[in-house]
Amino acid sequence: MPKMKTHRGAAKRFKKTANGKIKRHHGYKSHILTKKSPKRKRGLRDADLVSGSDKRQINRLLPHDQ
């Protein structure tokens, strides 16, 4: 049986918390910021948690992160 490998693209985008939840950052924050309101840009700063329906797929991509 070959080794389980971590998906490096996913490893750079997601981090697991101590309680086993998965943290992610928002998109749409890198360019074309002039038309976005300050309130919207402020909201994009904070990290968010991955929804429950996506959690299983991301856990498969990150087999060794506990």
Image (spheres, helix red, strand yellow):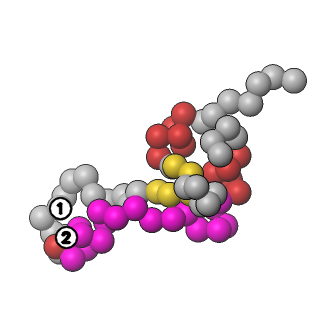
* SS for dot 2: loop
Relative horizontal placement of residue 16, taking residue 46 as reference (left or right): right
Q: Which residue is mark 1?
A: 33
Q: Measured along the vertical axis of the image, is residue 48 above or below residue 15?
A: below
Q: How many marks?
A: 2
* SS for dot 1: loop
| Label drawn at residue 36 | 2
Relative horizontal placement of residue 51, taking residue 56 as reference (left or right): left
Query: Label 2 amino acid?
Result: Lys
The segment highlighted magenta reads 39-55
Query: Label 1 amino acid?
Result: Leu
| Percent x, y of residue 41 | 23, 68
Q: Measured along the vertical axis of the image, is residue 11 above or below residue 45?
A: above
Q: Residues within 10 Å of mark 1 (few under 14, many from 20)?
A: few
Could you tell me if the residues under marks 1 and 2 are in contact, i.e. CB atoms within 8 Å? yes
Q: CA distance from mark 1 to mark 2?
A: 5 Å
Q: Residue at x 27, y 58 (%)?
A: 29
| Percent x, y of residue 30 | 25, 52
| Percent x, y of residue 39 | 21, 77
Whether residue 1 appears in this view of the structure is: yes
Relative horizontal placement of residue 8, taking residue 5 as reference (left or right): left
Q: Quadrant of residue 44?
A: bottom left
| Residue 51 highlighted magenta (yes or no) | yes
| Percent x, y of residue 49 | 51, 65
| Residue 35 highlighted magenta (yes or no) | no
Secondary structure mostly seen in the magenta stretch: helix
